[in-house]
Structure formats: C-alpha cells, structure tokens
Image (spheres, rainbow, N blue to C red):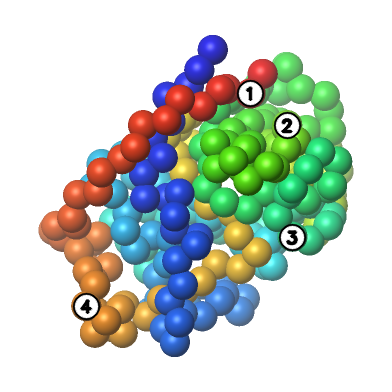
Amino acid sequence: MFGLISLCFFSSLLAAQWDGFSVSFATKPPTERVPSPLLKWPEKGSEYAILVDKSLQKVFVYHRDDPYQPHRTYTCSTGENQGPKLRENDRKTPEGVYFFVRAIDKKELLPIYGSRAYALDYPNVIDRREGKNGHGIWFHGLNKPLTPRDTNGCVALENPDIDDLANFIRIDDTPVIVSEKIEMLAPRKWKKNGKRSPESSRPGGRPGKKRCRQVHVPVQP
C-alpha cells in the first residue's frame, strides 16, 4: 500500500542557509523572527506545521496565519545519541522533513508508548537516496516520567501533550520538520535581501504559489 505524499518546498528547507540573518532558539522562539523552514509556506496544504528542536527538546506547532510565534509548545524527548539518524539501532532521531503516515490507538500499543502514537515516513525517499535506513520512528506518549534524550530515536511527549498535539495532525498532510537547532530569520532583513516578506503569510497576505512534486512513498507497516 502506498501513501501519496506531497513533497513540496519542505524537501529543501533545512538545506537553505541564511548567512548573517539567522539565529537559533536560545530558550524559546523570539517573536520578532520566523523559523526559516516556514518562510515559504505553500498557499495550499496543511494549516499547521510541527517543528522539533532537538537541542531544546521542544516540539513547536505553528499555524500558517502566524509564523512569528508557536501556536503550541511541548517538552519532548528525542534519541539518546546526537546527530541525524543514519542506520538501524543507532538511537538517533532523524533530521529532515517528514509526514505522519499512521495513527496508532492506545489499544494497539504496548504500555511504554502511552496514550497514542503516530508513525513517521522515515526513511523517506530522500533518506533512502542518501543510504539511510531504519524504521519505526514515532511520535508517542509515555508510561513513565519524561527524560531528555531518552528514546531509541522516536519523539516522546507526556500523554496530555501527545493527546493535545493530535488535534493538529492530519495523516499524509501535516509536515514535521526535525532539526538539531531551528534557524530563525529576521523578517525586515529578509525583505532587504529581496525575498517575500513573512507578512504575506498573515491574514490578507498573498503568498506566491509553489509547485509540488508528487512522490509515492511506501507507508510503514
């Protein structure tokens, strides 16, 4: 069975460099800056994007109408080893752009995964092209206290938080952008650099359309 996943501009977002204009989160996202992956938010598609900052052990939910501040912020736990996931059993959390491909109810889960889980499409087509492997990367709850960098590669949240996050997840639609540090861009400097201002992502804005490349990606069992 295949899931039709639209890999739009997101596939190249984390590779973009904004030298001289970007900063990383210190303890929380600065309200006068925008996460660089959200600067080219497509006109159509998911209203929400989920960002994971591994350095902060935080999950941020952004809405397209306000890329300046997160709609929700949760504390999380990622893989116990640093760096992007490369192979099976390396206990690292993947870095890149992913989509949720399956929702797993509590009745289907072992107690260690808490109240619910969502499977990601790791390894996606880009990961496989780069020779990465492994499987079973989930967002999930817990049946124990949350500890930083304490998973085998999944993104774990406390049960009330994963239950709340579920309100913003649409299978095969909501993008998940995972990075070691989320780069932030000052909008006024971005405008001077000749690119579209994030103000166009706010209500009444007219963001430019982006073409999407349709790719068939196998759904993880």
Residue at 73% x, 17% y is 108
Crowd rating for badge 2 (residues with CA inside 10 Å; few <14, some 14–19, many 20+): some
- Name the disc covering residue 220, or none: 1
Crowd rating for badge 1 (residues with CA inside 10 Å; few <14, some 14–19, many 20+): some
Residue for badge 3: 83
Three-letter amino acid code at the position of disc 3: Gly
Residue at 57% x, 22% y is 219
In 3D space, how far apart are the residues under numbered discs 2 and 1 (Cα atoms)?
8 Å
Could you tell me which secondary element the residue under label 2 belongs to?
Answer: loop
Residue for badge 2: 136
For the residues labelled 2 and 1, say whether their Cβ atoms are less than 8 Å apart: yes
Is any part of residue 146 visible from this angle?
Answer: no
In 3D space, how far apart are the residues under numbered discs 3 and 2 (Cα atoms)?
18 Å
The percent position of residue 120, horizontal first and vertical second, equals 61, 35
Residue at 63% x, 31% y is 119
Residue for badge 4: 194
The percent position of residue 54, horizontal first and vertical second, equals 68, 61
The percent position of residue 91, horizontal first and vertical second, equals 83, 48
